[in-house]
Amino acid sequence: MGSHATLTVPTPERMGRLGRELAALLRPGDLVLLSGELGAGKTTLTRGLGEGLQVRGAVTSPTFVIARVHPSLVGGPALVHVDAYRLGGDLDEMEDLDLDVSLPESVVVVEWGEGKVERLSEDRLEVRIERAIGDTADGDDQDPRRVLLTGIGPRWADVPLADLG
């Protein structure tokens, strides 16, 4: 059960716009699982999400802090941006991060979360970003990307992901 879509995103600017469009579909308590190789555009997409949600603070890769909270400027959900790369086996550690927000009232975006966050919620949006043109070692940031969106669980059953882009 759920919905899915595959989009081709030609430029980083368009990736940011996709993030803003996606933000319009998100609501408090949503879990977004972002995957893709380094440099694929995960942070660019998340930055667009932050703009769309109108949160405070520049969205950068949370590499050194594991989780960064961006409070809403407009009374909407906070954006919690998590880098699970260094988290252990699963996200019991999420509870230990001592975030100053309630996860059910926030939009939680997790990078590198495969195999770690799935049990946090039966509902989640999985976003996989791939280079559209094979794997070139000197992968150019300007290369088109393929973005696979998969909504899992009842929350996403009727969300028109295919309307994005």
Image: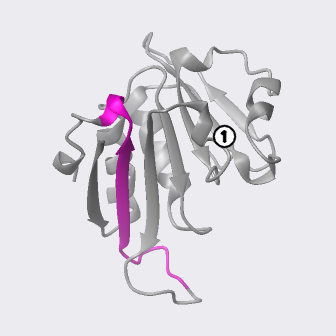
The three-letter amino acid code for the residue at tag 1 is: Val
Name the residue: 46% across, 28% down.
Answer: 30
Crowd band around label 1 with a 10 angstrom C-alpha radius: few (<14), some (14–19), many (20+): many
Task: Please state which of residues 58 and 88 is positioned toward the viewer in this rendering.
Answer: 88
Image quarter where the N terminus lies is top left
- 158 above or below 164? above
Total of numbered circles in the picture? 1
What segment is highlighted magenta in the picture?
139-156
Please state if 148 lies on the left or on the right of 45 as rendered.
left
Determine whether the residue tagged by mark 1 lies in a helix, strand or loop: strand
Q: Is residue 58 visible?
A: no
Query: In the rendered structure, does residue 93 fall within the stretch colored magenta?
Result: no
Query: In the rendered structure, does residue 144 fall within the stretch colored magenta?
Result: yes
- 21 above or below 140? above
Residue 76: quadrant of the picture: top left
**Residue 33's spot in the image, x, y percent?**
53, 46
Q: Is residue 155 visible?
A: yes
